[in-house]
Amino acid sequence: CDDSDASSTIVATDADCDGVLTDNGAGGFDCDDSDALVTNECQDCIGDYTVNNQTDLDAIAFCRSIDGTLMIEDTNLTDLSELQYLTSIGTQFWIKDNTNLTSLSAFENLTYVGHFLKIDGNNLLTSLDGLQNITDLTQNVQITWNDSLNSISALGDINLDPYSLTIGNNP
């Protein structure tokens, strides 16, 4: 397929034939060229974002990057899969006081957090799986008060000064 020529069968500009160009030449990219059902373009999101409910989450669902802070806090959300396209967060990333959150698997594409990663008070979270691809984090990590957390091995590849790491009050 080729979106510029409906009769073409060459995968040149639309790798998954979903009707969204792989690269539209104006900074827009297909969010997932392996899934023909995804027809939204990913975008670089400017500013700081706070997610307190499903509506807030839906508003940033197709962010490829966030140049500011992302705070996911005080929610009843169980699933964050809408954020599966996110690859970088410019400054701070907080996941705090989410009473029903059990998994961070939505963040498997996340490789960069600019300054601060805070995971605090997520009572049902058992592991940090999903964060294993973060290799670039310039400053602090704080993992505290996660009552069911029994593994932080997903963060094993982060290069971080030991004095920038706070882990406490987890099982």
Image: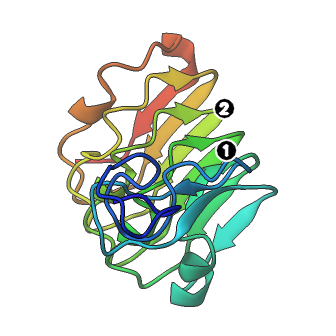
In the picture, residue 124 is in which quadrant? bottom left
Q: Which colour scheme is used?
A: rainbow
> Which residue occupies the extreme right position in the image?
47
In the foreground, 127 or 162: 127
Query: Relative to 83, is 56 above or below?
Result: below
Looking at the picture, tell me which residue is in the foreground, 41 or 66. Answer: 41
Give the residue drawn at x 36%, y 47%: 169
What amino acid type is highlighted by mark number 2? Gly
Judging by the rendered image, the residue that carries numbered circle 2 is: 114
Residue kind at label 1, given as amino acid type:
Gln
The quadrant holding residue 112 is top right
Is residue 37 among what the camera can see? yes
Q: Name the N-terminal-most of marks 1 and 2.
A: 1
Residue 163 location (% of width, % of height) = 55, 14
Q: Are marks 1 and 2 in contact (CB under 8 Å)?
A: yes
Q: Is residue 69 left or right of residue 147?
A: right
Q: Which of 90 and 77 is in front in this view?
A: 90
Q: Position of residue 144 (x, y in %)?
A: 43, 47
| Number of numbered callouts drawn | 2
- Element class at badge 1: strand
- From the top left corner, tell me how far across and down residue 161 is, in percent: 53, 10
- Crowd class of label 1 (few under 14; some 14 to 19; many from 20; radius 10 Å): many
The residue lying toward the viewer, choosing from 125 and 110, is 110
Circle 2 sits in a helix, a strand or a loop, which is it?
loop
Q: Point out the image quarter for the N terminus.
A: bottom left
Q: Which residue is drawn at 81% across and 57% down?
A: 47
Per the image, the residue denoted by label 1 is: 92
Q: Is residue 167 left or right of residue 10?
A: right
Residue 163 circle label: none
